[in-house]
Image (tube, rainbow, N blue to C red):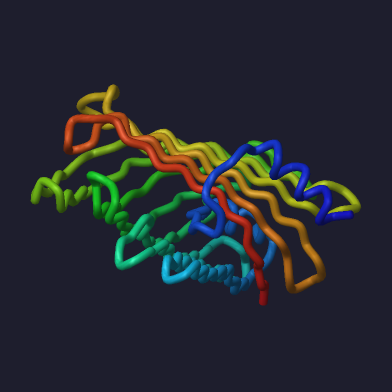
Amino acid sequence: MRLLCLFLILLCLGSASLYAQVVNIESARMQTDSVRFVLSNDFSFRYNDNDGNYIFEVSDAIYTQLKSKDFRKLYFFLANFGLIRSKGEDFSNNWLVHLRFNYRLTRVIRLETFVQSQGNQLLDVSGRHLLGAGLRFRAIATERVRLYLANSYMYELEISDALNQNFYNHRNNTYMSFSVELPKSKITITNILYYQPLYRDISNYNISEQFKIEVPLNEKISVNSSFYYYFDSQTPGNRSQYTSTFYIGIGINI
């Protein structure tokens, strides 16, 4: 029954590329908000060969979270990788490493700092490196529903291999994250929306949307599906550019 529910929901999402890698930092953190230590890994692999015409796809995401005994400090690490290749040509080649620290100031406010490095060889911005700090607010926190709002300053280094140039930016980073666990079925739905404009030119902005459904099969194994959309209003090539990914995978939680 749970698998049937997941299939029907996925049909409503529309078509996109399967087995691709998705970044979902907030989803990983929110679902473990009351647990001190978590280690989880999502992996998918596919190889298809039709008379010498092959497609090789692999993706992996690992994240871990550690909280102090008083739950005031949180350390979070995530790394992932995704590749789709055929006849020596890459149709998708991206990776990300993210480290974040949270410190609880009050019941509803946290100070958070983060560093991140990511790459996508098929976009104008082939490399992106971030350093930021700000405040995170807990708007709703019940047993099944969580809503967080956050705002921070972010220093950004963009690398464009196509133009052989580096770009140094100061951006504002605003995001809203929402998570709900359905009763009885234990299905978890998570949605996160990021908005990141330049301080000197708000018409130059990035938007990131991340949607995830996780269906537990037992305490350790789950089937999950994610949709990821990223839009850059003005790349170093003076054009707008977007990327979207849809994937289904198996999750193992420790």
Question: What residue occupies the far bottom of the structure in this picture?
Answer: 254
Using the rendered view, name the quadrant where residue 134 is placed.
top left
**Residue 135 in the image: above or below residue 68:** above
**Residue 44 in the image: above or below residue 199:** below
Percent of width and height locating residue 100: 43, 60
Q: Along the line of sight, which residue is nearer the eye, 13 or 139?
A: 13
* Quadrant where the image shows the C terminus: bottom right
Percent of width and height locating residue 164: 8, 51
- Left of 14 or right of it: where is 123? left
Residue depicted at 54% across the width and 44% down the height: 16
- Left of 216 or right of it: where is 157? left
**Residue 138 in the image: above or below residue 129:** above
Percent of width and height locating residue 171: 28, 37
* Quadrant where the image shows the N terminus: bottom right
Residue depicted at 39% across the width and 54% down the height: 113
- Left of 157 or right of it: where is 241? right
Residue depicted at 58% across the width and 68% down the height: 42
Can residue 97 be seen in the rendering of this structure? no
- Left of 140 or right of it: where is 169? left
Question: What residue occupies the far left of the structure in this picture?
Answer: 164
Using the rendered view, name the quadrant where residue 215 is placed.
bottom right
**Residue 235 in the image: above or below residue 38:** above
